Image (cartoon, rainbow, N blue to C red):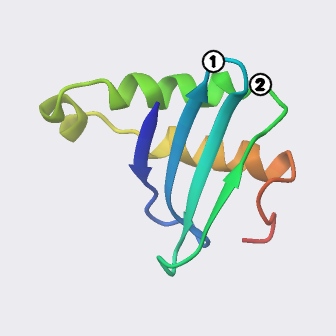
Amino acid sequence: MFDIRVDGDPSVQRIAAIAFVDAGVAFVLLANDGTHFSVVFPEEDLSDFTDPLSRWFALSLHERATTPFRGSAILLLGALRRCGYLDATA
């Protein structure tokens, strides 16, 4: 679905989303240290947060360079934190 860099988050450097036909969506989160990652399979429907990022990722490189996505990434990380999948203090 997407693989993006997250600038300014205290704990996550990158986030990727992978859609599975029968298993939903998995998120792969790379820690800021670049050496640790976690994989999350949320039970909640987070499509309101993933859809904008998937649409952005499908744009051409030129369009991506001129279209902001940071706000959508921050909202997704916030949703993952509210659901208990990421440390809320980070």
**In the image, residue 49 lies at what x, y percent?**
62, 30
Task: Name the foreground residue: 26 vs 46.
Answer: 26
The residue sitting at the front extreme is 22
Q: Callout 1: helix, strand or loop?
A: loop
**In the image, residue 34 lies at what x, y percent?**
47, 76
> Does 28 sit above or below residue 48?
below
The residue sitting at the top extreme is 21
> Does 34 sit above or below residue 51?
below
Nearer to us of marks 2 and 1 is 1
Residue under label 2: 45
Given the image, on which type of amino acid does mark 1 rest? Val
Residue located 72% across and 71% down the image: 90
Residue under label 1: 21
Kindly report the distance in space between the C-alpha atoms of the residues bearing marks 2 and 1: 14 Å
Q: Earlier in the sequence, mark 2 or mark 1?
A: 1
Residue located 84% across and 33% down the image: 43
Task: Name the foreground residue: 39 vs 82.
Answer: 39
On the picture, is 75 further left or further right than 73? right
Residue located 58% across and 58% down the image: 29
Given the image, on which type of amino acid does mark 2 rest? Asp
Task: Name the foreground residue: 11 vs 43.
Answer: 43
Task: Name the foreground residue: 87 vs 71.
Answer: 87
